[in-house]
Image (cartoon, rainbow, N blue to C red):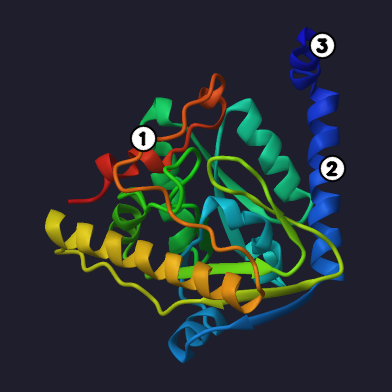
Amino acid sequence: MRWLKRLGRSTAARRLVAWTAGGYLTLIYRTTRWHQEMPAETRAILAGDRPFLVAFWHGRMVLMRAAWPGRPQDLHMLISEHADGQMIAKGMAQLGFSTIAGSSRRRGAVALREMGRRLRAGAAVGITPDGPKGPRMRAKAGVIAAARAAGVPILPLSGAASRARGLGTWDRFQLVLPFGRGLLLWGAPLSVPPEADEAARDRLRRQLEGELNRLTAEADRRLSRPRVEPAPEGTAPHERKRSAALRAPLDAIETHESP
């Protein structure tokens, strides 16, 4: 399948894929009947001008377009600076979203500094705590470290769609289909004190993971979708031959947090 590899290296092909992805996300956003629910304190943060992090599972990222109506340019997505990551970034740009480029090769320092700059400017940053290669629905420490370093709350978010196809990928990616119902559930804000030690940060990581899994299970139940279980504790990240193409800066952020 060498021709497929050559196609994947083509700039024109990457642009076509990005354009197609943008069109698909726009289609499901406009043809699905969306409903959102959130606690009062989360609603207050979303309605205000305070910066924050949004945490959602990798397998539910398609739903994020619907979670951010109105001004998508205010949400900045953390995406690898590798060529494949930037293909995803171009797809997000089709919808008006901004992205933050970084790579684990550079240990996440550049991404963390850029995240801090945008958060200080009042923006929101979206992160997948289990991305880009798992284990599925298990939060990594990087999202807690990023919130602590920036001094911003984390808003948990998950959801489901009545018309969707669960793929057999490591994250059980939910491919939403048009003309269904969508449910988005926000959790209460999670704050990370600047003085939080390693044990406290790990408790907060587990708390975030538990809340995201609770929201996911509830959304699936209410839309009569098959429940997706987290990967067993201790599962190794998903390995793939081209995993370097989508390395996440989040993996290394915890080594660059502020003291």
Q: Check disc 2 and give the amino acid type.
A: Trp
User: Closer to the N terminus: mark 1 or mark 2?
Assistant: 2
Q: Residue 56 location in percent, x, y?
A: 51, 60
Q: Position of residue 92 (x, y in %)?
A: 71, 49
Q: Is residue 12 left or right of residue 167?
A: right
Q: Residue at x 64, y 62 (%)?
A: 64
Q: Which mark, by number, is residue 19? A: 2
Residue 90 versus residue 136: which sits nearer the camera?
136
The image quadrant of residue 246 is: top right
Classify mark 2: residues with Cα within 10 Å, few (<14), some (14-19) or many (20+). Answer: some
Residue 217: x %, y % from top left: 51, 69
Report the mark closest to the observer, 1 or 3.
1
Pointer 1: what residue? 236
Question: In terms of image quadrants, where is residue 15?
Answer: top right
Specify the amino acid type for callout 3. Answer: Trp
Q: Residues within 10 Å of mark 1 (few under 14, many from 20)?
A: few
In this orientation, which residue lies closer to the viewer: 157 or 153?
A: 157
Q: CA distance from mark 3 to mark 2?
A: 21 Å
**How many numbered tags mark residues here?**
3
Residue 158, relative to residue 168: is it above or below?
below
